[in-house]
């Protein structure tokens, strides 16, 4: 029996994207979304452990964390937040374009999403470069001497405790950046699929699923930004 | 996407986008104002509002057909709270040691 026979049997109604074990397209889309949300639940717990570690150390080394956080460029962090929010908008626009058969808009917004994603990583790179030059990367050459604690100008932050802040900073933003890189790979693939005309108003599940992932990464950043960049900024 | 929302959701998407940008600006500005211990509360409240906006409107939780989806989302938040609240109930109250 040839493959084409099987395909004909399963899809008598000319709905090639509807798999035969689903009742209709809506159910197929809902099932895919549900599966993605369960994956995102595991991702929440994955990042949750790091947020928990952050909370515990922030409580223990309150002033040292404030001093260390102040050395990070908050303007770059705020810019990156805005960049990610714009990329989330272009993602929902791409899905809307697929739903309404607007091919040029879909491809344009997918390209824009990737441009915003790359801009985020570029700005992150500038930030990391500053930290390297300031010897704020945890390790043998780490140095954080004579930095006053916010609110206590007569006290210096403990470099060991500040090093824990920077460890958390690099692990959390690094893991987030890794998610961004994976997201860029997913969106490159979505762009190719869109270019080939694979998405129709009936079938755009990969866009919806890729979008859920991208928005999740955005939400993680929404929490990372105030917790890492904005603690104890006031004079 | 539900059938009854076939009308253009563009206005909603751009409104949410604008609200997220305003939230980012507010959280950035509020961080430079002396509010004592309320600085963290303000920052985390704005972050949670922003996260809710993204989840409800961009991730389409609002208007989702599948009821199980809401169960998954609520369980996720619940277990995250268990992790954070129980850990802080321990580490946060070790003042006597």
Image (cartoon, coloured by chain):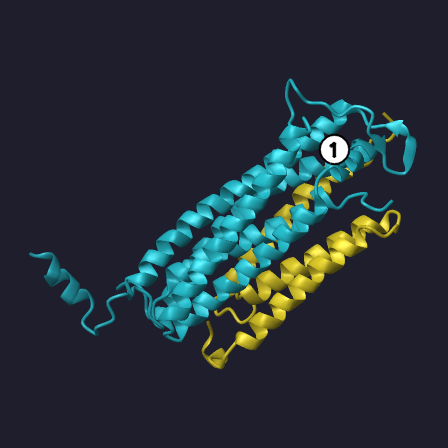
Q: Which residue is mark 1?
A: A57
Seen at 54% across and 53% down, the residue is A216
Q: Position of residue A185 (x, y in %)?
A: 41, 48
Q: Is residue B93 left or right of residue A29?
A: right
Quadrant assignment, res A165:
top right
Secondary structure at badge 1 equals helix
Task: Say left or right for A55 vs B72.
Answer: right
| Quadrant into which the N terminus of chain A falls | bottom left
Nearest the viewer among A226 and A52 is: A226
Colour chain A is painted in: cyan
Residue A5 visible within the image:
yes
Query: Could you tell me residue A108's position as x and y percent?
Result: 42, 64
* Residue A98 location, quadrant: bottom left
Q: Is residue B4 above or below residue A217?
A: below
Rendered residue at 36%/74% (across/down): A101
Q: Position of residue A189 (x, y in %)?
A: 35, 53
Which residue lies at the image location 61% right of the left edge and 49% below the top edge? A221
How many marks the image carries: the answer is 1
Q: Residue furthest left?
A: A1
Q: Nearer the viewer, residue B51 or A48?
A: B51
Q: Within 10 angstroms of label 1, few (less than 14), some, or many (20 or more) residues?
A: some
Q: Is residue A40 visible?
A: no
Question: Which color is chain B depicted in?
Answer: yellow
The quadrant of the picture occupied by the C terminus of chain A is: top right
Position of A201 with respect to A116 (left or right) is left
Query: Relative to A166, does residue A192 appear above or below in the rendering?
Result: below
What is the x, y in percent for residue B55? 58, 61
């Amino acid at each position: 029996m040839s493959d084409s026979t099987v395909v004909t049997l399963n899809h008598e109604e000319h709905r090639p994207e509807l798999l035969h074990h689903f009742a209709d397209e809506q159910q197929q889309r809902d099932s895919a979304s549900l599966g993605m949300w369960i994956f995102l639940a595991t991702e929440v717990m994955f990042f949750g452990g790091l947020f928990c570690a952050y909370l515990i150390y922030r409580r223990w080394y309150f002033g040292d964390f404030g001093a260390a956080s102040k050395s990070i460029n908050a303007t770059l962090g705020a810019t990156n937040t805005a960049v990610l929010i714009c990329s989330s908008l272009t993602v929902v626009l791409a899905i809307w374009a697929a739903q309404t058969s607007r091919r040029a808009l879909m491809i344009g917004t997918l390209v824009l999403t990737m441009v915003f994603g790359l801009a985020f990583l570029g700005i992150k790179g500038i930030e990391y470069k500053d930290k390297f030059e300031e010897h704020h990367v945890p390790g043998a050459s780490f140095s954080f001497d004579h930095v006053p604690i916010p609110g206590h100008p007569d006290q210096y932050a403990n470099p060991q405790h500040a090093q824990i802040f920077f460890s958390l900073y690099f692990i959390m933003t690094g893991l987030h950046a890794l998610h961004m890189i994976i997201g860029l790979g997913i969106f490159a693939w979505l762009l190719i699929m869109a270019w080939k005309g694979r998405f129709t108003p009936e079938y755009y599940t990969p866009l919806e699923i890729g979008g859920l992932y991208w928005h999740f990464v955005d939400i993680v950043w929404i929490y990372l930004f105030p917790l890492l960049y904005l603690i104890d900024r006031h004079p | 996407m539900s059938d009854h929302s076939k009308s253009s959701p563009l206005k909603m998407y751009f409104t949410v986008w604008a609200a997220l940008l305003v939230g980012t600006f507010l959280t950035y500005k509020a961080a430079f104002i002396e509010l004592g211990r309320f600085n963290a509360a303000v920052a985390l409240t704005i972050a949670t509002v922003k996260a809710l906006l993204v989840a409800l409107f961009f991730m389409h939780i609002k208007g989702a057909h599948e009821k199980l989806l809401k169960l998954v989302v609520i369980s996720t938040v619940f277990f995250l709270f268990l992790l954070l609240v129980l850990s802080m109930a321990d580490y946060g109250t070790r003042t006597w040691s």
